[in-house]
Amino acid sequence: MRIFLYSVETSLKSLWREKWINLLTVLSISIGLLIISAFATITHNLDSVLKRWSRDFGLVVYLNDGLSKEAEDTLTAFFRHDADISGIKYISKEQALEELRLTLGEQSPVLEGFEDNPLPSSFELTLKQERLDPVFVQRKASEIKRLNGVEEVQYGEKWLSSLNALANIMKVSVVFLGGAVFIAIAFITYSTIKIFFYRRKDEIETLKLLGATRSFIRLPFLLEGLFIGIMAGAVSALGLFGVYSLVMSKVAGFLPSINIVMVPLPLKAYMPAPLAGALMSFLGSFVAVGTIKY
Amino acid sequence: MIRFTNVSKSYDSDIVLKDISLSIEKGEFAFLTGPSGVGKTTLLKLVYCAERPDEGEIVVAGWDLKKIKPGTIPFLRRNVGIVFQDFRLLMNKTVFDNVALALRIHDMHPQEIKQYVGDVLKEVKLKHKENIFPQHLSGGEQQRVVIARAMVAKPTVLLADEPTGNLDAETSGAIMKLFRGINAKGTTVLIATHNDSLFHGMGRRVFYLKDARIEKERIE
Ligand SMILES: Nc1ncnc2c1ncn2[C@@H]1O[C@H](COP(=O)(O)OP(=O)(O)OP(=O)(O)O)[C@@H](O)[C@H]1O
Ligand SMILES: [Mg+2]
């Protein structure tokens, strides 16, 4: 335990003595972590936007003109039995026209130009929460479209599918980029610790001759790597918080809808970067110190 | 305490020690002498496992060095205090910290470390320089720091390689007195030196190294 405390002291001293190299190392690592956190955050936001939008959209099922009451009832019954559907709202031709009239307000007289009611009857379907992924919505829509009496199904498909494709690309890139960044972190710490290790080669030799054990020699270096990683993680978490808050407050000024896209990050979203940084940095220093031979 | 049996050691093709056998008993105070380059330092290095013999057996404080595991070597060395010929002081640490290092590796309590280091620095008359860095000390003062570090952990064996090389006759005398003191408390002492005035008239065993062999062994 005292050896541990002494190692902590030694590593902190070394952090301070070599503050410029360490600062550079910490900054390089935190930039890497910041890039990956930013990517992950954007992806996360995109994902949650997709979820919410597909919830709002629901499915609008337009019916063939002049569909019989029995056929409509059959469809109602069918939707009611579908386990994926949580809400059904029937809108008749007349209701649709009334709604349109209300929406148009003062311009509603333009509707007088039509002899017949041009609007179709429709169902507005709400899907169960857990079924709200874009791919599923798409499949469900084409399934319903094949039913008898259905003219058209709308669900904002263009938006959904392109956003979804983007989100998927982002997810894959986050994984690859993350992997690359983590390896880079381990490597950066590896080279810094290796430099320190070589610089203190004489001192290490003396320690060995005085009877120091392997862990006594190793521990300060490992701790130093760990501290570098934690500091870099903290810096990047602060950076992410800063950038994110800035974007949310500044962009919201001229683009209020950004608040729909960006949700405030929960505290735990700031944790992975420091943890990953610490872990990879520790790993880097572990490899750098290697085995001590007697 | 230290026993060599038919030990040979060469660097590349250069034979430094050939068929050395010697035995130093527990509590003994012995000397190793011979001309420069004869292999005194090499022999001491064999004792603390910094070099391995090509042939022969070495037993130190009960450890058979042929069978010792790398992980055990630190524990052997904690029983052996060493005054290195090249000092091996850490230049980025103060006198106090240099000496304290020999105790820190033992996981000793800081309060105790302070006590032990303070006492030994008083013995070598360097208490007033404990916060100074070694490069600001004279050669003789550095020498005494090294001696303090070797003694502070109260080792069972003390090896001193040319411990008075940088000292005047008077200080040498004081240092030899320190060694006699630690020897009186039970530590086995082996001193390598080419300065024969250190052992003349001491009545101690002296091993004479010449041409890779122990030429003679006698009480001076
Ligand atoms: N690591 C090494 N590699 C090759 N040769 C070495 C090595 N160490 C020592 N030698 C050689 O071994 C011989 C003995 O060296 P050693 O240092 O043991 O002598 P010494 O008796 O201590 O001399 P001095 O009184 O000058 O300190 C020398 O010829 C030296 O050049
Ligand atoms: Mg020598």
Image (tube, grey):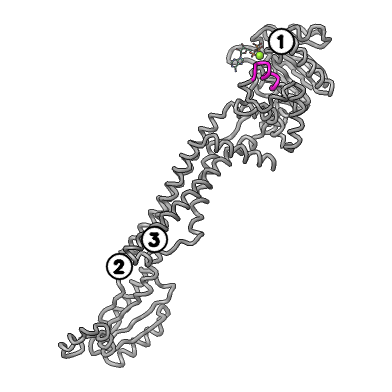
**Chain ID for label 3?**
A
Three-letter amino acid code of the residue under disc 1 = Asp
Horizontal side, residue A207 vs residue A73: left or right: right
Task: Say which quarter of the image contains residue A102.
Answer: bottom left
Quadrant including the C terminus of chain A: top right
Q: Nearer the viewer, mark 2 or mark 1?
A: 1
- Return the x and y of residue A158 as percentages of the image width and height: 28, 68
Q: Residues within 10 Å of mark 1 (few under 14, many from 20)?
A: few
Residue span colored magenta: B137-146
Q: Residues within 10 Å of mark 2 (few under 14, many from 20)?
A: some
Total numbered circles: 3
Three-letter amino acid code of the residue under disc 2 = Trp
| Label of residue A249 in the image | 3
A163 inside magenta stretch: no
Give ligand 2's quarter of the image.
top right
Task: Determine which residue is flagged by label 2.
Answer: A159
Labels 3 and 2 share a subunit: yes
Q: Nearer the viewer, mark 1 or mark 3?
A: 3
> How far apart are the two marked residues, 2 and 1, measured between alpha carbons?
92 Å
> How far apart are the two marked residues, 3 and 2, measured between alpha carbons?
26 Å
Q: Which residue is depicted at the point 37% across and 63% down? A: A46
Task: Determine which residue is flagged by label 1.
Answer: B168
Is residue A45 something one can see in this rendering? yes
Three-letter amino acid code of the residue under disc 3 = Ser
**On screen, residue B112 above or below B187:** below
| Label of residue B153 in the image | none
Is residue B73 something one can see in this rendering? no
Q: Which residue is depicted at the point 70% across and 32% down? A: B72
Task: Say which quarter of the image contains residue A73.
Answer: bottom left
Q: Which residue is depicted at the point 65% across and 38% down? A: A6
Q: Nearer the viewer, mark 3 or mark 2?
A: 3
**Chain ID for label 1?**
B
